[in-house]
Image (tube, helix red, strand yellow):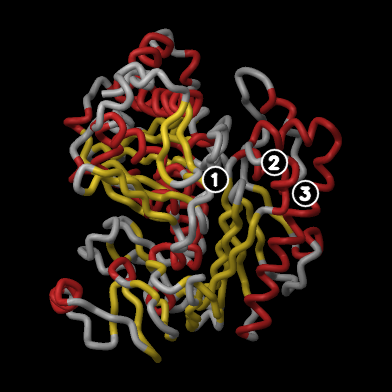
Amino acid sequence: MLKKVQISLQPLGKRISVNQGTPLIDVLHEYGVEFPCGGKGTCGRCKVKLLQGKLQADAVQQKKLKKLNLGKDWRLACFCKAESDFTIEISQFEEIILADNSTFSFSPGEGFGIAVDVGTTTLVAQLLNLKTGHVLDAATALNPQVKFGGDLISRIQSCLDGKQDEMQMLIRKKTGEMIQSLLEKHQVEISKVVLVGNTVMHHIFSGLNVQSLSFYPFESPDLGMQHFSGEQLKWKLPRETTNRFYPSIGSFVGSDILAGIAATNMAEKENFSILIDLGTNGEIVLGNREKIICASTAAGPAFEGAKISQGMRAVTGAISSVQVESGKMKCHVIGNVPPKGLCGSGLIDAMAVLLQQEKIGMFGEINSGEDKIKLASGVFLTQKDIREFQLAKAAIAAGLQILLNTFKITFNEVENVFIAGGFGNFLNLRHVIQTGLIETPEEKIIKMGNTALIGAKMFLFENDSSIQKILEKTSHINLEANSDFQDIYVEKLMLT
């Protein structure tokens, strides 16, 4: 049995127990630490301060720390493993908001505010000092609506079956509890709460009719900003506190993507940028300061483990990466425990590796003639899983191609491709490209972390006119309505 190691996280005041030898990247991403460079030690965003105990830094890490001008108490979490008990300070909580990998300039406000990412699967709230822009604390929780289904279609169906009032009560109650825990811990009063989320989350939280989202063309008349009093939400907040759920862009593209557009700064740039969110619902955005077009795809569930026979979220027990060492397949399991299944990044890696080893063909067929391939002890990838990956990959790749065609440009004219979500922390970009998911050079791809939350924090400092400017230049298209979609989709089913 593996020995347990205790990790204390400050200023969160949390203590977590992990198996000895567990990489910090496996546990810290759940607490808001991001790994944009994918563990190469080049960005410094995952830096943590060692307050007590031991956390080894080898010669390679020390060289990286020196290059980043970090002293002897600092470590790069992407290089570290938990070998013995220690206490660290998460650097995120002493840095001001970051957007587009640079410091976000803002007009200081007064008091405190809270930004909330209302995700289909997870909820994240952060408390900010509006004068300094510093994040003081964070709270995370599973969305209690998951018992009504893991995907948006299931949630909509539950609403149509008469469960919307219960679902609304659950999400408001849980979000309120998270906010209250932050306020009680820091003994402060807040003046603003900003909430962002996809269109279905926006509608359920706000008590809006979701029926129009259940059939083609999936358009709702109620996409706008929603305002609430603390009393309406049954939250114990000062009467003057503003609580706003930000507007959706269209169909299944919500204010989480609006926030992502703000976080990447794409609406201010002359050159084209792409934003891809491979969450529970897959959204893609392309544009610049002149015009922005976005769309949603039915790709997300596969990348979050849904519809995969042994699929799971990126949590303890999930195979998060697969690579070849000395000709043999090697799997990394989150949490340094025996594997239970694989998450989206592990699925992409497995596909790329199996293609390299010629265990599967370009049409997705298993070359041995069997119906599954062993990845690790007790974990297999089936022929059906491969087909699900092809469908998800083709949806994203075809969607990107249609957006490019709409602007009459190619990937050559795109400056950056931003990947949103914690899912991106584990992505091997070389494998993403090899499978044909994103057909652009690796150096153009930037892992942005939780762009919805970054944007929500930015909204705490923005006025409505700046948000309106983004909305005015942003339009939503329905991919399936495009006459070329089916042909491009079929073409993208191929594995390159």
Tell which residue pokes out farthest to the bottom in this image. Answer: 52
Mark 3 secondary-structure assignment: helix
Q: Residue 493 at x, y = what percent?
A: 37, 18
At label 3, the amino acid type is Gln
Q: Are marks 1 and 3 in contact (CB under 8 Å)?
A: no
Pinpoint residue 237: horizontal percent, then vertical percent.
73, 72
Mark 2 or 1: the one toward you = 1
Question: Residue 237 or 36: which is nearer the viewer?
Answer: 36
The amino acid at mark 2 is His
Q: What residue is shown at x 18% (from left), y 45% (from top)?
A: 443
In the rendered image, which residue does mark 1 sit on?
312
Q: Which label's residue is closer to the chain start, 2 or 1?
A: 2
Q: Amino acid at mark 1?
A: Met
Q: Which residue is mark 2?
A: 203
Quadrant for residue 38, please give it: bottom left
Q: Residue at x 28, y 69 (%)?
A: 79
**Cα separation between marks 2 and 3:** 9 Å
Quarter assignment of residue 23: bottom left
Mark 1: few/some/many CA within 10 Å (<14, 14-19, 20+) = many
493 or 367: nearer the viewer: 367
